[in-house]
Image: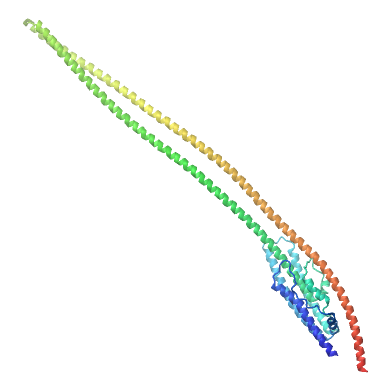
Amino acid sequence: DVPALDDVGNDEQQRKCLAGEDGSTLPRQDSVDRSPSYGVSFDSVPRQRAEPPEEIVSSVQSNYDDESVVSGSAKQKSDFQALKTEVEYRLSNILDCTDSQLSSGCEGEPSEQPAKGKVKDLFSYLDQVELKCEKGAFKGATGPVAVLPSESDRSELDFAAEPDYIEAVPKMNDLLELPPHQLARRVIKLSLRANELSNAMQLSKNHIATVRADKAKAIRTEKCALQGKLKEQKKHYEDIIGRHQEFIDQLIKDKSGLCDKVTQLTRRLDSQNQSWEHRLKTELERARDTALAAEKIRREKWVRENTKKIKELTVKGLELEINKMTATHQKEIGELKRQHKDELMCALEELKLQYEQKEADVRQGLVKERETTIERERQALLERFDRQVTEERNIFEQQRQHLLSEFDLEKERLQKEAARKAQYAESQLEDLKRENTKNLDFAQKEYVQMLKQREAKHQDELEKLQKQFESDFAIWKREHERKSKVELE
């Protein structure tokens, strides 16, 4: 009968080890294969511990074989060591990610340092649990009793599918009472929760980066619009300057045309002066010829009359007197000729001076009239140019003041908009931080509360199992003593 019980105990111990492997390794594999996300569940974990109560009773009665207890403890220790290695690797990755986030701009968050300290406490706690597991395995190998997984082990798989929340590091004495696979599951859940928090923080950072990118895009758009307006204004003023230059060129052309007209008028006056001089000279020659012809006719007439008179009065006795009279007459004629010539020269000189004076007066009047006309036109052009330049300058100054006021208003509006967006981004960041802090506090409180409930439930189940184990051991002891007595008899 005893070897049969040993075989049954070995089978049950192997089933226990397999159940422990399923309960410890399957969540780890799921945590390794699946990336952490919000709402992580362990519904895919197979519940292989739902066995009939008769098999549990038979497994409890068959767990007193020393070799099966030692092999089961060694198997649990190896599984726990593998779980511990995986958890340490994942927690070290979380620490590295946390350190990189802190170094990249999150040093101001006060909740990162306590989380790092909690992870270090978890590492020390795992080492202590490993030591206690080794001591428990040694006691299980030397002692007469070993405990099989019960209904609480099956409840741990259901507990793994529930959300975990942590408020503070649990007490060492309370956690030391938990089995290794349960502790490993909780550490894995804590690592998943840390990954969720890091993902939430990364999403917040991505949102902030998106907001900043939108803000930069809006600023670039406003800058492009302002540059377009600046180009349009520059083109407008270049057109105005071009019109002004065209107007100045037109004034220069008008001035050159007026200079040409003045030159033409000067040439015309010179030609008129020359024609007047030629005309005066011609009239003087004609007047002189007329005077000479008239004098010649008058002299011939006087000679004929005197000759006729002399012929009538002259006699031979009066020839000397006639000669004397002829000489006197010739002398008078010469005197008259000289006198007439002097008078003619004086008249010509006076006429010449008179015409020269008239010519000088006409020339001076024309010159003054030309200068007056040129000065009047120059003053009119200068006044019109100054008036147009003043008008254009006033228009330009008004447009400049208007554009400067619009630019100042637009600049002030953009600055206010940028400040408002920055304040909105800061407020959103603060809201996200407060929300994350509230969620973390709520998760920690809920986790502590659930941990206390699970610990109380686990303690009750341990007491029930202890009582059941003592009663079963007493029954087995009585039966064994009875069988021993029967065999001895």
Q: x, y percentage for residue 438? A: 77, 60
Residue for point 27% across, 20% down: 351
Q: x, y percentage for residue 1? A: 86, 90
Classify residue 360 as left or right of residue 27. Answer: left
Instruction: Give the mark count.
Output: 0
Quadrant location, the C terminus:
bottom right
Residue 57 sits above or below residue 113 on the image:
below
Residue 252 sits above or below residue 69 on the image:
above
Q: x, y percentage for residue 301? A: 15, 12
Residue for point 68% across, 62% down: 203
Q: Residue furthest left?
A: 316
Q: Give the colour scheme of this rendering.
A: rainbow
Classify residue 42 as left or right of residue 408. Answer: right
Q: x, y percentage for residue 19? A: 78, 79
Q: Which of 348/425 is in front? A: 425
Q: Which of 199/38 is in front? A: 38
Classify residue 483 as left or right of residue 192. Answer: right
Residue for point 80% across, 65% down: 446
The answer to whether residue 444 shows anywhere in this view is yes
